[in-house]
Amino acid sequence: MWVVRLSDKQLEVLRALLRSEEHLGPALQGALEALDLARWDDLPEAELPWDEVMEVARRQGISEADVIWDLSGRRRAVS
């Protein structure tokens, strides 16, 4: 796997180049989809309630990683 940083113009040119191909095989189609989806800088910063994580870990005698694992499985009620 490769990780690259492209300017908006470079990304636009790369997409145009891929779209100009007559036939996109599975690999190139996947690359085009990845380019359309992979805007990592548009994602919000992840934040964890570390004070709560440390307190729960201490109370339960488990690691902070276990608490985070438990939190990741918690589903929020949909109103």
Image (spheres, rainbow, N blue to C red):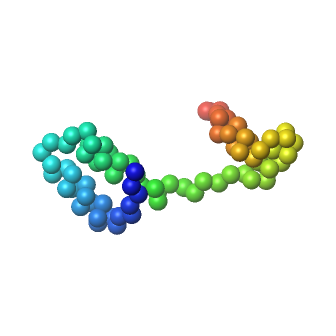
Question: Residue 25 sits in which quadrant?
Answer: top left
Can the viewer see residue 3 in this picture? yes
Can the viewer see residue 71 in this picture? no
Q: Residue furthest right?
A: 59
The residue under the point 80% across, 41% down is 62
Which quadrant does the C terminus fall into? top right
Drawn side of residue 63 relative to residue 30, left or right = right
Residue 53's x, y, as percent? 76, 48
Question: Residue 2 sits in which quadrant?
Answer: bottom left
Q: Residue furthest front?
A: 1
Drawn side of residue 47 relative to residue 6, left or right = right
Drawn side of residue 46 relative to residue 32, left or right = right
Q: Residue furthest left?
A: 22
The residue under the point 75% across, 47% down is 64
Pick whichever, 25 or 19, lies toward us: 25
Residue 9's x, y, as percent? 29, 66
